[in-house]
Image: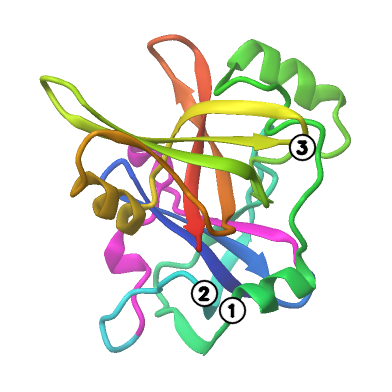
Amino acid sequence: MVKEIIILATSVKYRNYCIAGIDKATGEWVRIISDDDSIENAVRMEDMCYADGSVPKVFDVVRIKCKGHRPNFYQPENFLLDDTCYWQKVDRASISDVIKVHPPEDKPYIFYNHTKRIHKDDLEQICKVASDNHSLILISPKNVIVHVNEFPERKTVTISFDYNDCTYKWIPTTDTDFKKRYLELEPFHYRVKERVFLVLSLGVCDPKDGCHYKLVATVLE
């Protein structure tokens, strides 16, 4: 099985990568996973390379050989990569190309509620009866604010925004380039004036509190 996708997320996950995008033909979400449970099925850099040793970037159109569809109860988008094959870059896309096949989504909530997390028990019950289980979403938010905060042990970047009459506050981002840019700035609440699109992902269960946290995987500017 070969999936040709427009890459929309290459975020860090367990010191490896969470790779996701949309099928160029159908517009359906695709998350590429490995079979390594020790890193929560993240993708290692050596397994996502092109033949020349470079790695995919957001908006690359990539052909990836997969072993098959491997959904779990809350991540129906998962496809298991074939780690014996190089990935093949075939083109570059734009946000316009993405929107043609996958317009910003209009759901009542981001991942089933209006907070920044959802408990695993609630999620499991919802997914048993929901007709549109999903763990990836592309949105066009309003009133986007980037929060740079400095604590004794670290500096953080989180994002607040409005979506469908709900305000989502202090959502962490795993967009490496976006995060790096804001970490260079002074602590402040920065309002984003230009229009942006956000790719959000529902993270794995945090064993500390039994919750799945919502993450801004990519900020598309």
Q: Which numbered marker is on residue 14?
A: none
Residues 114 and 136: in front is: 114
Q: Is mark 2 on a helix, strand or loop?
A: loop
Q: Which amino acid does label 2 sit on?
A: Phe
Residues 208 and 150: in front is: 150
Q: Residue drawn at (81%, 45%), measured in percent from left and top?
A: 106
Q: What element carries label 3?
A: loop
CB contact under 8 Å: marks 2 and 1: yes
Question: What stretch of residues is rendered in magenta?
Answer: 27-50
Q: Residue drawn at (20%, 32%), measured in percent from left and top?
A: 155
Q: Residue drawn at (88%, 36%), measured in percent from left and top?
A: 131
Q: Which amino acid does label 3 sit on?
A: Asn
Marks 3 and 1, the one that precedes in the sequence: 1
Looking at the rendered image, the disc whose residue lies closer to the viewer, 2 or 1, is 1
* Left-right relation of 172 to 30: left
Asked whether 40 falls inside the magenta stretch, the response is yes
Q: Mark 2 points at which residue?
A: 59
Q: Which numbered marker is on residue 133?
A: 3
Q: Residue drawn at (65%, 46%), measured in percent from left and top?
A: 141
Q: Mark 1 points at which residue?
A: 94
The answer to whether residue 44 is above or below residue 89 is above
